[in-house]
């Protein structure tokens, strides 16, 4: 697999800006590129932090923009459901994970 192309970053830039804003005030956003992987899933995105309690988002894939959109959905779902940092329970959606 070749290194991510400019298009991956061009499409991702506005999504990264929105995620930075969504995670402000107690969230952590990690974007990793692992070009040693041979399965094509070179991108990893993690959203966690005190803002989300024991819930966090983690996904690996080849489509950076798609993963970032899923992370934004996680942040939006968290905010729209009015969950707080002490919210219990874990939702088992694709790309969503429970306590770390």
Image (cartoon, rainbow, N blue to C red):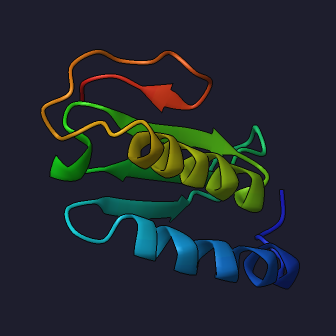
| Residue 95 visible (yes or no) | yes
- On the rendered image, what quadrant is the N terminus found in? bottom right
In percent of width and height, residue 75 lies at 46, 50
Describe residue 12's horizontal placement relative to residue 8 as left or right: left
Describe residue 82's horizontal placement relative to residue 65 as left or right: left
Residue at image point 30% right, 71% down: 24
In percent of width and height, residue 19 lies at 50, 68
Q: How many labels does the image show?
A: 0
Q: Is residue 89 above or below residue 26?
A: above
In percent of width and height, residue 25 lies at 22, 69
Closer to the camera, 94 or 38? 94
Q: Quadrant of residue 100?
A: top left
Q: Is residue 89 above or below residue 8?
A: above
Closer to the camera, 53 or 61? 53
Residue at image point 63% right, 57% down: 68
Describe residue 7's horizontal placement relative to residue 39 as left or right: right
Residue at image point 38% right, 62% down: 29
Q: In which quarter of the image is residue 3?
A: bottom right
In percent of width and height, residue 69 lies at 68, 54
Q: In which quarter of the image is residue 18?
A: bottom right
Residue at image point 30% right, 36% down: 83
Describe residue 35's horizontal placement relative to residue 77 as left or right: right
| Residue 42 visible (yes or no) | no
């Amino acid at each position: 697999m070749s290194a991510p192309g400019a298009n991956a970053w061009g499409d991702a830039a506005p999504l990264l800006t929105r995620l930075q804003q969504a995670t402000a005030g107690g969230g952590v956003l990690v974007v990793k590129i692992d070009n040693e992987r041979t399965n094509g899933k070179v991108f990893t995105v993690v959203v966690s932090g005190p803002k989300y309690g024991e819930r966090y988002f983690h996904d690996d894939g080849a489509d950076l923009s798609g993963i970032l959109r899923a992370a934004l959905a996680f942040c939006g779902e968290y905010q729209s459901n009015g969950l707080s940092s002490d919210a219990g329970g874990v939702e088992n959606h694709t790309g969503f994970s429970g306590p770390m």
